């Protein structure tokens, strides 16, 4: 009997653009590692981003945790061997969701930090939503790995948040926003950043990883690769 990969459960819909990126990365990665017509075996529970976005803006992270936790439990009951949140900002409720399931829940910060440290870097500029840049759920995790985390100034953080929520999650890519993002990274470089973390799934839609003035680490891509490491381990031995 042919061996199968572990089943990856994805909590999606935050936004669907983000979920589509995860789905593509997982399947492309499985094909690259296994060859042939292989895909990553997966399930996705798609949440309604309008509600999640509104609750986050109101600071109702308890509601976000309830919705995301319910989705994770559904994925586990449906047979998922591991679960991942297909949005960086959703990691604000990571601990709540982790407590809701018994299967592994993969944190986006761990493979990101490991990749940065493997390059011998330690001082990084973090880019993402206002929640990701201003709260501690990702930067704290990164600091736990020994990284020094910097963010843009307050006005830039608000601008980038609006670009992500009002443009990128709706599939809009604006030249003015691309210029604003590159200006932010230039400021971070002047302050001593050695690299950048693209801490929002949709950010590569605006500026690709190869177009930054310093090494750029796509947290989503690294998250997907970590999921594949687990899901495909038995098939590659």
Image: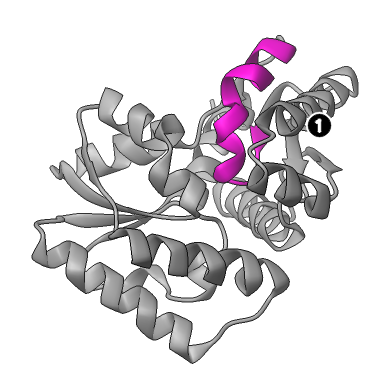
Q: From what the image shows, is residue 27 above or below residue 113?
A: below
Q: Which residues are magenta?
A: 84-101
Q: Which residue is mark 1?
A: 67
Whether residue 115 is situated above or below residue 24 in the rendered picture: above
Residue 91 belongs to the span the image colors magenta: yes
Residue at the image position 40 percent from the left and 31 percent from the top: 110
Confirm whether the magenta stretch covers residue 86: yes
Magenta region's main secondary structure?
A: helix
Decide: few, some or many residues near mark 1? Use Cα within 10 Å; few <14, some 14-19, many ≥20: some
Along the viewing direction, whichever of 145 and 135 lies nearer the viewer: 135
In the rendered view, does 198 fall on the left or right side of 14? Answer: left
Left or right, 41 with respect to 111, comes to: right
Which residue is depicted at the point 55% across and 56% down? 201
Describe residue 145's horizontal placement relative to residue 109 as left or right. left
Q: Residue at x 21, y 35 (%)?
A: 147
Residue 44, visible in the rendered structure: yes
> Which of the 4 quarters of the picture holds residue 28?
bottom right
Count of marks placed on residues: 1
- The quarter holding residue 172 reads bottom right
């Amino acid at each position: 009997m042919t061996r199968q990969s572990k089943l990856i459960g994805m909590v999606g819909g935050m936004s669907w653009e983000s979920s589509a990126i995860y789905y593509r990365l997982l399947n492309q990665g499985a094909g690259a590692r296994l060859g042939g017509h292989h895909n990553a075996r997966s399930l996705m529970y798609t949440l309604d981003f309008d509600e999640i976005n509104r609750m986050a803006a109101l600071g109702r992270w308890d509601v976000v945790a309830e919705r995301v936790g319910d989705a994770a439990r559904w994925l586990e009951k449906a047979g998922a061997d591991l679960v991942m949140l297909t949005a960086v900002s959703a990691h604000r409720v990571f601990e709540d969701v982790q407590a809701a399931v018994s299967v592994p829940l993969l944190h986006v910060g761990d493979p990101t930090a490991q990749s940065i440290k493997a390059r011998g870097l330690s001082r990084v500029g973090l880019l993402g939503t206002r929640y990701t840049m201003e709260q501690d759920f990702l930067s704290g995790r990164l600091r736990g790995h020994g990284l020094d985390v910097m963010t843009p100034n307050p006005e830039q953080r608000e601008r980038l948040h609006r670009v992500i929520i009002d443009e990128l999650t709706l599939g809009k890519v604006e030249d003015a926003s691309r210029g604003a993002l590159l200006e932010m990274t230039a400021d971070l470089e002047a302050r001593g950043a050695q690299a950048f973390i693209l801490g929002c799934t949709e950010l590569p839609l605006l500026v690709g990883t190869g177009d930054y003035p310093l090494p750029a680490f796509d947290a989503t891509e690294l998250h997907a690769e970590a999921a594949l490491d687990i899901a495909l381990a038995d098939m590659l031995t």
